Image: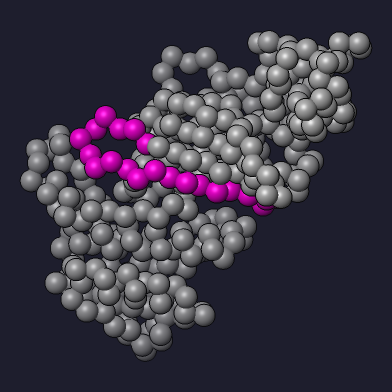
């Protein structure tokens, strides 16, 4: 019999059961019991227990969760991993991939550890659907592999196709440093981690302009941004203390791009982006994006007496 990570199994020769949390080799599995101990067991000494595990609640119509996301995104709401605890085996967590969008997702999950790759999951996740994709022992967090999610977004709407997403994630202690909370569509508590938050978002400003000529029912409303946009990470994310430098930069650039495109849609004459001085990385990235934008006439340091060299003023055509 072939087992996979997350399977609930029972020992053949003794009264004990648990979850498969490690594949040691072709003949041996690591099984974590209800006391949280991982035991190496021969495959021949295990049998599957069907109909057991962490499952989604039975609900008539799945509803999207309320999350803090930009007003205009490639994927409405987003793609998340809900890491749920297990009632019976406290040391085990279950990874549920959650599609909080109106699109259908074709997903594959592979893992990599020390140059060795393995396929962990592949399947179709319907809009606002959930699928169990992985299980592991939380105590072995430092031993977890790196995860690569490949996502193809399928939409029935009259819209430009979304580019396939490749999301690489190495889970760290900071991902589980917050208090466990109720998870959407799941019975168990745990942590909700957004996967596509670091995927760069671009908006076709011309398409959005054209939308204003549609009927009220068809029109996609874009909220006008503020005249001054503060890109300091503490203004954008409450959990900024747990973010790495690369994550912070990508979040700031995404927020910048969303605000810039919205300003173009609303025919702004000019606006100011407050990026701070720091080491100049964010400023340089923003200036590079501005210089390539056909809707921008010029840009300059904004009011040095107020911002020093920590802000850029953009003048639109």
| Quadrant where the N terminus is found in the figure | top right
Q: Which residues fall within the magenta stretch?
A: 153-175
Residue 175 appearing in the image? no
Q: Nearer the viewer, residue 38 or 234?
A: 38
User: Does the magenta segment cover residue 12?
Assistant: no
Q: Nearer the viewer, residue 234 or 102?
A: 102
Question: In which quarter of the view is residue 275 placed?
Answer: bottom left
Residue at the image point whose x is 68% and y is 49% from the top: 115
Residue 313 at x, y = what percent? 29, 77
Residue 261 at x, y = what percent? 26, 59
User: Image height check: is 111 above or below 271?
Assistant: above
Residue at the image point whose x is 85% and y is 15% from the top: 45
Q: Is residue 28 left or right of residue 95?
A: right
Colour pattern: one colour
Residue 75 at x, y = what percent? 36, 42
User: Image height check: is 284 above or below 266?
Assistant: below
Q: Is residue 61 left or right of residue 116?
A: left
Question: In which quarter of the view is residue 109 placed?
Answer: top right
| Quadrant where the C terminus is found in the figure | bottom left
User: Image height check: is 312 above or below 94?
Assistant: below
């Amino acid at each position: 019999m072939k087992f996979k990570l997350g399977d609930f199994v029972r020992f053949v020769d003794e009264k004990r059961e648990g979850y498969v949390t490690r594949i040691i080799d072709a003949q041996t599995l690591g099984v974590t019991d209800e006391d949280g101990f991982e035991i190496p067991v021969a495959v021949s000494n295990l049998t599957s227990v069907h109909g057991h595990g962490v499952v989604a609640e039975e609900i008539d119509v799945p509803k999207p969760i309320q999350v803090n996301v930009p007003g205009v995104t490639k994927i409405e709401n987003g793609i998340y991993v809900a890491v749920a605890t297990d009632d019976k085996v406290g040391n085990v967590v279950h990874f549920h991939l959650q599609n909080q969008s109106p699109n259908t997702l074709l997903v594959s999950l592979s893992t990599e550890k020390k140059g060795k790759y393995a396929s962990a999951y592949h399947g179709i996740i319907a809009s606002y659907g959930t699928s169990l994709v992985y299980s592991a022992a939380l105590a072995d967090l430092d031993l977890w592999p790196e995860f690569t999610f490949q996502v193809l977004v399928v939409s029935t709407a009259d819209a430009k196709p979304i580019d396939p997403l490749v999301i690489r994630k190495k889970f760290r202690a900071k991902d589980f440093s917050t208090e466990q909370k109720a998870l959407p569509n799941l019975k168990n508590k745990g942590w909700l981690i957004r996967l596509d938050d670091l995927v760069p978002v671009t908006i076709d400003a011309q398409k959005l302009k054209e939308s204003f000529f549609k009927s009220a029912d068809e029109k996609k409303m874009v909220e006008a941004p503020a005249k001054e946009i503060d890109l300091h990470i503490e203004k954008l994310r409450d959990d900024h203390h747990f973010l790495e430098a690369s994550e912070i930069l990508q979040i700031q650039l995404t927020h910048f791009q969303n605000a810039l495109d919205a300003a173009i849609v609303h025919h702004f004459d000019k606006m100011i982006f407050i990026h701070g001085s720091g080491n100049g990385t964010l400023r340089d990235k923003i200036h590079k994006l501005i210089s390539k934008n056909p809707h921008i006439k010029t840009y300059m340091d904004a009011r040095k007496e107020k911002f020093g060299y920590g802000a850029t003023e953009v003048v639109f055509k």
